[in-house]
Image (tube, grey):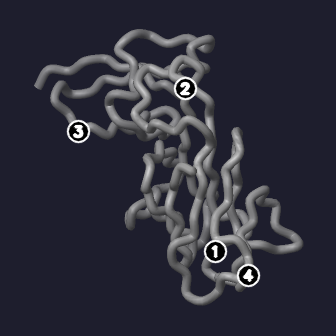
Amino acid sequence: MPTKTIYCPRCFASLSVNVGASQLVKCSKCNYIGDLATYSERPLKREDSGTDIVDSSGFYKPAKLEMIKDDGTWISGCPKSITLKRGINTLGRQSDNSQSNTQFPTTDPFMSKNHAAIDVIYKSRTATFEHSLSDNHSMNHTYLNGTPLESGDIIVLKKGDEIRLGHTIFKLINE
């Protein structure tokens, strides 16, 4: 099968993929996972990191995580959504000794205090935001749309994606 060379938009590594391959590609160097369209067919340099090749997310400001399901451990009266900020949002259960900068008001014992991270990156060329999810070596894994993330995976999120931390499920939404 013929191959072509593409370049990772996160670490700029060159990758060889089969023509007509799956739409999802995983970078062998940094574990970035994105649609084939997010990879470039031309070599990238560091100065390209603020631009985007193709951005299909359509987020024009950082998204929100809205809690859509829990097992009764959400603390009543607390907001059920949180707006993500630009940069790295570490997600975890609320605790006095949590190092997460985004703490959820839950007593879910299956959600770690530092469970996962969502990196929100501004793409200047398209004036949109990219949201990518990774697991922080949590004991109970991070799930995206019902599928567990592998160690080291970095997955670009889309509107409506469901993220499970412990027994709590969130949906990625725009305002």
**Quick one: 162 or 138, which is closer to the camera?**
162
Residue at the image point whose x is 58% and y is 48% from the top: 63
Tell me how far mark 1 sits from mark 2, CA to CA: 30 Å
- In the rendered image, which residue does mark 4 sit on? 77
- Farthest residue in the front direction? 175
In the shown orientation, is residue 17 left or right of residue 69? left
Q: Gap in Å between the C-alphas at discs 4 and 1?
A: 20 Å
Q: Amino acid at mark 3?
A: Ser
C-alpha span from label 4 to label 3: 44 Å
Q: Look at discs 4 and 2 and give the one toward the viewer.
A: 4
Dot 2 corresponds to which residue? 11
At label 4, the amino acid type is Gly
Q: Earlier in the sequence, mark 1 or mark 2?
A: 2
Q: Closer to the N terminus: mark 1 or mark 3?
A: 3
Closer mark to the observer between disc 1 and disc 2: 1
Disc 2 crowd, CA 10 A, few/some/many (<14, 14-19, 20+)? some
What's the residue type where badge 2 is placed?
Cys
Q: Residue at x 39, y 25 (%)?
A: 39
Q: Counting residues from the N terminus, which is met first, the one under dot 4 or under dot 2?
A: 2
Q: Is residue 60 above or below residue 48?
A: below
Question: Which residue is nearer to you in this view: 112 or 16?
Answer: 112
Q: Secondary structure at mark 1?
A: loop
Residue drawn 62% across the image and 43% down it:
62
Q: CA distance from mark 4 to mark 2?
A: 42 Å
Q: Whole-percent x and y of residue 108?
A: 65, 82
The image quarter in which residue 24 lies: top left
Disc 3 designates what residue? Answer: 22
**Mark 4 or mark 3, earlier in chain:** 3
Give the residue at mark 1: 111
